Image (cartoon, rainbow, N blue to C red):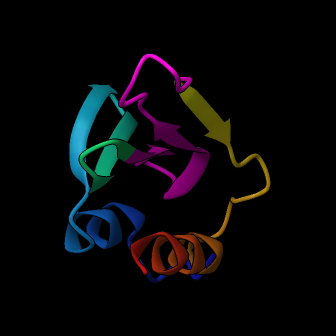
Amino acid sequence: MNNTENLEKFLIDNEFKLDTYYDTNKRYVKEITDYQNLYVRIFSNVNKIVDVEYENLAISPFEKYNIISFETIDKIEQLKHLIKALSI
């Protein structure tokens, strides 16, 4: 990740909202649709992505609730591409 780019500012600028936090461990959420959310957990003191998760809520009794963890996303460029892909 480009150390000069602030991860927390990037999330806020891209319409993420603070979901939970404990000290420098912060989890942000972005609503993709009414039934889809993207979560990004960061360590704000070291400007590092800890984990990224995509949540799909069931909209009927015939669908399943799912969370997909993107374990390989650890750089801001990768996160930018994911956000772009989900926003189309």
Left or right, 66 with respect to 8, comes to: right
Does 46 lie within the magenta span? yes
Q: Look at the image and give the residue range highlighted in magenta.
A: 37-64
> x%, y% of residue 53?
56, 42
> x%, y% of residue 9?
27, 69
Furthest-right residue in this view:
72
Tally the numbered discs. 0
Q: Give the quadrant of residue 13.
A: bottom left
Pick the residue in front: 45 or 12.
12
> x%, y% of residue 21?
30, 27
Image quadrant in which the C terminus is located: bottom left
Q: Where 68 sits versus 14, above or below?
A: above
Query: What residue appears at the point 63 percent right and 75 percent down from the top-left corner?
Result: 1
Furthest-top residue in this view:
61
Query: What residue appears at the point 21 percent right and 65 percent down from the top-left corner?
Result: 15
Q: Where 2 sits versus 51, above or below?
A: below
Q: Give the quadrant of residue 57.
A: top left
Pick the residue in front: 50 or 14.
14
> x%, y% of residue 6?
38, 72
Left or right, 64 with respect to 13, comes to: right
Pick the residue in front: 70 or 59.
59
Q: Where 74 sits versus 1, above or below?
A: above
Query: What residue appears at the point 33 percent right and 72 percent down from the top-left corner?
Result: 10
Q: Where 14 sits versus 44, above or below?
A: below
